[in-house]
Amino acid sequence: MPDLSVFELAVANAISRQKISTDEDLQEVLSDWFQRKVRVPDVSAALDTMIAKGIVRRGDETLCEYRLTPHGIDAVTSLYGGCIRMIDRGLGLLNVSMILNLLTTTRESDDA
């Protein structure tokens, strides 16, 4: 089972999106999701932890240049599937496969 905090999962999802092109964009997205100012040191710490776990790899010196590894894509997909099932509360009203297909979690490094 992937071991990520909610914040790490959010960072992984944010960096997997094609629309993130600057550190400011990344901070803005995360700040919007959590409805509070997200600090660069917090994002950096989460990324360092995820590098150690093999979830992301460093692409450059900027926060937005990180990429999910194949293990990271699997971890994010597994955790989101669990979150969707929790929200559904076992009622079967939400189609997990359909919702997961809507997520953009395929931005993998060429040499990951």
Image (cartoon, grey):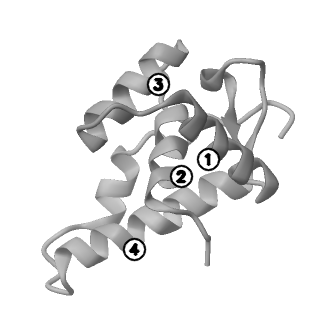
C-alpha gap between disc 4 and disc 3: 24 Å
- Nearer mark to the viewer, of 3 and 1: 1
Disc 2 marks which residue? 8
Q: Position of residue 69 (x, y in %)?
A: 73, 46
Mark 4 or 2 closer to N-term? 2
**Left or right: residue 107 compared with residue 109:** left
- Nearer mark to the viewer, of 4 and 2: 2
Mark 3 or 1 closer to N-term? 3
Residues at discs 3 and 2 in contact (Cβ within 8 Å)? no
Q: Which image quadrant is residue 27 in?
A: top left
Mark yes or no: residue 19 visible: no
Above/below status of 63 relative to 13: above
For label 1, the SS is helix
C-alpha gap between disc 3 and disc 1: 13 Å
**Left or right: residue 20 compared with residue 107:** left
Mark yes or no: residue 87 visible: yes
Give the amino acid type for the residue marked by disc 2 in the picture. Answer: Glu
Disc 1 marks which residue? 46
- Nearer mark to the viewer, of 1 and 4: 1
Above/below status of 69 relative to 52: above
Q: Quadrant of the N terminus?
A: bottom right
